[in-house]
Amino acid sequence: MGRQQRVAILGATGAVGMELLKLLEERRFPVAELKLLASPRSAGTHLTFKGERIPVEPVAEASFRGLDLVLASAGASVSKTWAKTIVEAGAVLIDNSSAFRLDPDVPLVVPEVNPQEAFRHQGILANPNCTTILMCVAIYPLHRHIPLRRVVAATYQSASGAGARAMVELEEQTRAYLQGQPLQPQVFPYPIAFNLFLHNSPLQENGYCQEEMKMVNESRKIMGSPHLRLTATCVRVPVLRTHAEALNLEFEQPFPVEQARQILAQAPGVVLIEDWERNRFPMPIDVAGKDEVAVGRLRQDISEPKALELWLCGDQIRKGAALNAIQIAELLLNGVPTPGSCEISSSTAGSR
């Protein structure tokens, strides 16, 4: 795999940052040198990579000198602050925040969907929103066969989408609830244990929240369909990691269910989980810590002849964030999708 790379993880101590570190090792990415960067609050701690304890350094202008690649997951404001410095230092920035996703000069890439876009970068590439990545991996193979007209999405998003502290908050509130103690939200605006609420991102003037509009705008850009009609309702649920989505997909013409099932069974990055006799379809426990987007309960919409219903689950921290970023880096390094990044992964209907 390509030449050795001098790599930095910006936001190394966050949930996605630590997953990036894990994946660099798991996927044997050719790391010649690794820097772990974070806020001054996290500086001085150590993380382990290939058996070596590496110190976490406070990010500074000098941090990026001599690097080839920066994997950033520290928030939009941090990415905007350091992007110019990173590019001027000669490194490529793959950014997991929303800072550059809709910038027309910045590729927004899901390797299973639009790998060719990665090669037009000017030093910065954007990693899409987690729910957008999971949805596009599942629906693009169908869209290529028969174009989509409209997508109606409802998401069920785990605590991991709000970071490591949110996951801790869910665990602590669960213990408190079971012990009859009061729940004290800090990361989320409302109790997350044994509860759910509409996504906590800021509401926009059109009545949609920021998360919902990310799905709309980013999906159009990734799939090269600027006029795709898409609406979403995003919900936060008391699951540690792995998002789920219920999708209603309307096509330009009727799409035979069995044909769609066959396409998805062979689609890169997708695993089909369907056992109709047991009413057994994808669940978060099926894909937590795994690479694939699990798809199932594919059926004809009884209200619209040209529409299908689809259910999916995918690990938000992994494919929805860190894995997708690593796959983009592998793409740049090798010039083609790498084995294991965009490979066909499926199970037969009725089995796991």
Image (cartoon, helix red, strand yellow):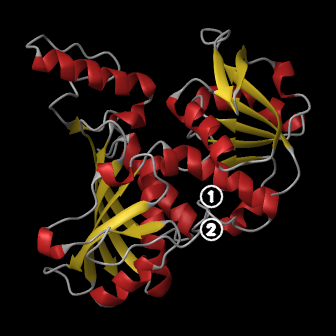
Q: Residue 95, position in %: x, y?
A: 65, 41
Looking at the rendered structure, the kind of residue marked 1 is Val
What secondary structure is marked by label 2?
loop
Q: Residue 23, position in %: x, y?
A: 61, 43
* Quadrant for the N terminus in the image: bottom right
Q: Is residue 230 left or right of residue 335?
A: left
State whether residue 41 appears in this view: yes
The residue located at (58%, 60%) in the rendering is 110
Q: Nearer the viewer, residue 173 or 340?
A: 340
The residue located at (48%, 72%) in the rendering is 140
Q: Is residue 88 left or right of residue 17?
A: right
State whether residue 252 appears in this view: no
Q: Nearer the viewer, residue 310 or 285?
A: 285
Q: Residue 58, position in %: x, y?
A: 72, 14
- Contact? badges 2 and 1 (CB < 8 Å): yes
The correct choice, above or below, for 79 with respect to 158 in the image is above
Q: Residue 174, position in %: x, y?
A: 20, 23
Distance from the alpha carbon under mark 2 to that under mark 1: 6 Å
The residue located at (74%, 28%) in the rendering is 82
Q: Work out whether mark 2 precedes mark 1 in sequence or the reverse, and give the earlier one.
A: 1
Q: Which residue is mark 1?
A: 109
Q: Which residue is mark 2?
A: 114
* Quadrant for the C terminus in the image: bottom left
Q: Which mark is residue 56?
A: none
Q: Label 2 crowding class (10 Å Cα cut-off): few <14, some 14-19, many 20+? A: some
Q: Residue 80 sits in which quadrant?
A: top right
Q: Is residue 197 left or right of residue 101?
A: left
What secondary structure is marked by label 1?
loop
